[in-house]
Image (cartoon, grey):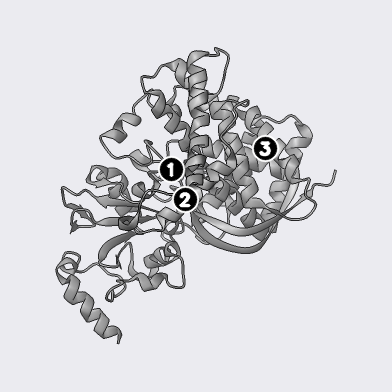
Amino acid sequence: MAGIFDSLFRMRYGSVMKKFEGIPGPTPIFPIGTMSEFAKRNPWEVFVDYEKQYGGMTLCWLGGEPTLVLNDPNLIRDVLITKADDYYKDYPIKALRPVLRNTVFNLNSPEWDKLRKPHSHPCLIEGLDSWLESQFPVVKSVVDRHLSKMRETAGEIEILDKIQRLFFDIFNSIVCGPQFQAGGYENYYKMTVVATRRMATPQALLIPPLDPSFHSAMSAHYGSYEKIVKQARQNPDPAANDLLSIFLRQGSEIPDEQLVDFLSEFHVGGDVSSAAGIVNTFQFLNDNPEIEKKLYGELAEMIRHKPDYDLSSIGESTLLDHVLRESLRLNPPVQVFGRNVRKDRTTTLGGREIPPNTSVMIVAKAVQRSASHWKNPDQFDPDRWANGGVDANPIGSDYFFPFGRGPRMCVGWKIAMFSMKIVLASMLSKVFVQTSGSFKQSLHCGVVETKEVKARLVPHQA
């Protein structure tokens, strides 16, 4: 029976298949192509396994649409860096349009280029690194406040939800100021749920959201940033140290409407992925008790000697940095992301001519677990980052790009790394985080989240 549907597919799409002849991949059948591969497993899990089955480039078919899946760092470098101008970003721009307006995430050139010029984006301010260091007490204060509330629950808590709420407040506090009144976490979360649902809908079937509660949530969310931008413009505070105030003081000609879009972008671009990274790290530590015990001990000792620890103290904990990097290597929150060949040209990839508008899926997780580069690639081993490991594999390099790479690498990645380190240090220095649950994975705004995770916070013994 399979042979009949295989033949039907060739009859219907034979002319297109010739353009990709020789590229390995599962056999497509009519009318679904190779989508049966995803019947029992998540697409990102299937894409990771393609490396072992078919090599660095795999051809799959989403219905009659050919898609190239890349698990080879050299091919990925071509798409994201060397020949970046031959590609554009398609999915999920249309799906996210009602939620994200004009941001560096969902625009293409030439509009995108204008938003990445100096003085055109808050994350591109002069002196970003030194400003980040000054934000340590702000972030730590938010973490301590949230942790105190978490500890009020004697039993288990829904840890993913708690950490997402935590990052929502962290980014608001450092970007708009500790006194900023946001439009409400629930409104923001409702927007992400709608965005996620739209991302799972075929683009041809997408229509504008009709739910009045969604538009009410959007109004409250964006309205809070419109208000803070207006206040910052009309009543500038020369002593304010939030990112918005510094950005305005350095001078920018972008309109306020665009600035509002940027401020909202921190959440859709950072809350979900940062929270997923933290929860993943808790799980890896639980699964590796010797490493967990060592890290807890190091952080506790740090606090014992420096109760009012600061960023320099966290910097002394190389193990904390290595644990986070190893977590992001093994389980990057964004495991797969896409590009399309430009509609007006063909390109070459791996010595093959690729037709215009061909979809390309980039699989970060497979490369970051590649046995050709990493020793014992599936093992959680923070020590691999010691003795030059960090310098050999910087963020955004061939085999380690949890925030993407090239010109379109996440513009806020430094803020995310900074915040995640403080969250880990502040929480783990005070409590043991014991996780349990089904650990089911699902997509949330393109981020692979580990759902149904419970956690019990056990205080350290004095």
Mark 1: which amino acid?
Val
Circles 3 and 1: CB atoms closer than 8 Å: no
The total of numbered circles placed on residues is 3
Judging from the image, what secondary structure is the residue with disc 3 in? Answer: helix
**View extreme (left): residue:** 15
Q: Residue 83: percent from the left, percent from the top?
A: 24, 45
**Quadrant in which the C terminus appears:** top right
Circles 1 and 2: CB atoms closer than 8 Å: yes
Circles 3 and 2: CB atoms closer than 8 Å: no
Where is 169 relative to 379, above or below?
Answer: above
Q: Residue at x 41, y 54 (%)?
A: 199
Horizontal side of residue 5 vs 199, given as left or right = left
Mark 3: which amino acid?
Val
Local crowd size for mark 1, using a 10 Å CA cut-off: few (<14), some (14–19), many (≥20): many
Cα separation, mark 3 vs mark 1, equals: 27 Å
Q: Residue 400: percent from the left, percent from the top?
A: 44, 49
Cα separation, mark 1 vs mark 2, equals: 8 Å
Tag 2 or tag 1, which sits nearer the N-term?
A: 1
Tag 2 or tag 3, which sits nearer the N-term?
A: 3
For discs 3 and 1, the disc positioned in front in the rendered view: 1
Reading the image, the residue beneath label 1 is 99
Report the disc number at residue 194.
2
Q: Residue 350: percent from the left, percent from the top?
A: 24, 57
Reading the image, the residue beneath label 3 is 143
Where is 72 relative to 309, above or below?
Answer: below
**Quadrant in which the N terminus appears:** bottom left
Judging from the image, what secondary structure is the residue with disc 2 in? Answer: helix
